[in-house]
Amino acid sequence: MKCKIIRQTKNYLTLEIPNEGQYEYFRNERRNCLVGKNSVSIYNIDIFSFTNETATEIEIQKVDVRVTPEDYLEFAYEKNNVVGWESVHAAVAYCWLIKPLNYKTITYQIDHVDGNKHRNIPENLEYVLPHINLWRAVRNQYTGAIGKFVSIYFTNKTDVEMFQIMKDIVEDEEKNLKN
């Protein structure tokens, strides 16, 4: 569908969607898509592929979405004639969340704060360390999480490494109690 471009900056577009209204989208150049947090339901995220962009118009199309065996949502994208799949929460985090300062040197994962893997709004997503993400899965009693947690984080670790993992978990639990 053709949409009128109302305003644009390097990363953001405000579009006039026919029969719907004006909405803001983040241009995700990495996956050649537009990501918006403005659908009718507060729990949904709009993701469109785009083509035929001019200074005043852009043609958009809803992307295909599927559910992975782990119950995450993924969308299809095409870039440079290659089709791939990206998790919706990763695309939303890339567009709307501020990355931690040490993002390039430490591995982070994106956690769904309330545990609902289909609720991919920025307010429900957070960059966390991998052991915090897995600990939250254990705390929320997700199937298989406790075995995975123990095998990954309590096998072949030094006392100092184990202490740091537990310290991070305690700090995260304290932060959750304050909220």
Image (spheres, rainbow, N blue to C red):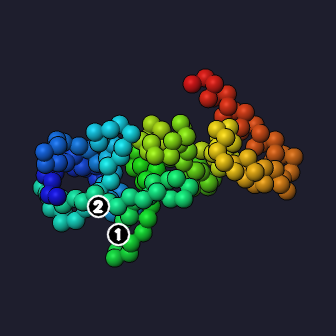
Please indicate, yes or no, whether residue 98 appears anywhere in the rendered image.
Answer: no
Q: Is residue 116 left or right of residue 41?
A: right
Residue to which mark 2 is pinned: 49
- Name above or below for residue 49 compared with residue 71: below
Q: Quadrant of the N terminus?
A: bottom left
Q: Of helix, strand and loop, which one carries label 2? A: strand
The residue nearer to you, when weighing 40 against 5, is 40
The residue nearer to you, when weighing 21 against 103, is 21
Q: Is residue 97 left or right of residue 134?
A: left
Residue 55: % across, % down = 14, 58
Q: Quadrant of the C terminus?
A: top right
**Residue at the image point whose x is 58% and y is 50% from the top:** 109
Near mark 1 (Cα within 10 A), the count class, few <14, some 14-19 or many ≥20, is some
What amino acid type is highlighted by mark number 2?
Ser
Which label was assigned to residue 78?
1
Residue 9: % across, % down = 25, 50
